[in-house]
Amino acid sequence: MALSYKARKRWSLVILVIGLPIYIILAVGIVALFERPPILVELGIYVGLGFLWIMPFKKVFIGVGKPDPDADPRSYPHDPAGKYGLDDDS
């Protein structure tokens, strides 16, 4: 079942505000359990973990920054490019 645009937008906010800080704390805690590796290896671990967290949530974040595809273009509150014809007097 595909999530609606509004549901994806809400879930992406929850993931970023609540889930990401929890993931960062867990990742740092787990890495701290082991002996500290050389700095480049540690950097590689953190970069790898930084990409790993997004993989399960990739579909939630796709298209969230774009306008709602199901909404009427004339109801958009701000259209700086005039893409939807709001600058016309008609």
Image: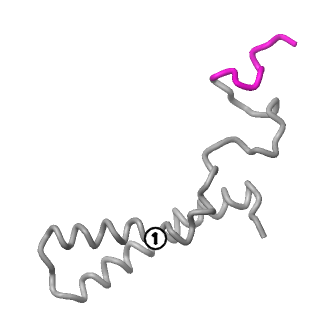
Disc count in the image? 1
> Please, is residue 84 above or below residue 47 in the view?
above
Magenta stretch: dominant SS?
loop
**Quarter where residue 29 is shown:** bottom left
Q: As drawn, is 29 to the left or to the right of 13?
A: left
Say which residue label 1 marks.
53
Where 85 falls versus 24 (above or below)?
above
Badge 1 density bin: few <14, some 14–19, many ≥20, Cα 10 Å: some
Residue type at mark 1?
Trp
Question: Residue at horizontal 14%, vertical 69%?
Answer: 39
The extreme left residue here reads 38
Q: Residue at x 27, y 73 (%)?
A: 45
Compared across the picture, whether 34 is left or right of 8 comes to: left
Residue 78 locus on image (x, y percent): 68, 29
In the current view of this chain or complex, which residue is farthest to the right? 90
Segment tinted magenta in the rendering: 81-90
**Residue 2 found in image quarter:** bottom right
In the image, residue 18 sits, relative to residue 10, either above or below, namely below
In this view of the protein, which residue sits in the foreground, 21 or 72?
72
Element on which disc 1 rests: loop
Please state the horizontal and vertical placement of residue 70, each as a whole percent of the image. Answer: 81, 46
Is 61 inside the magenta-drawn segment?
no
| Residue 75 sits in quarter | top right
Q: Quadrant of the N terminus?
A: bottom right
**Figure colour scheme:** one colour
**Could you tell me residue 4's position as x and y percent?**
77, 59
Left or right, 76 with respect to 64, comes to right
What residue sits 63% from the left and 51% below the top? 64
> Which quadrant does the C terminus fall into?
top right
Give the residue displayed 82% in from the left and 29% down from the top: 74
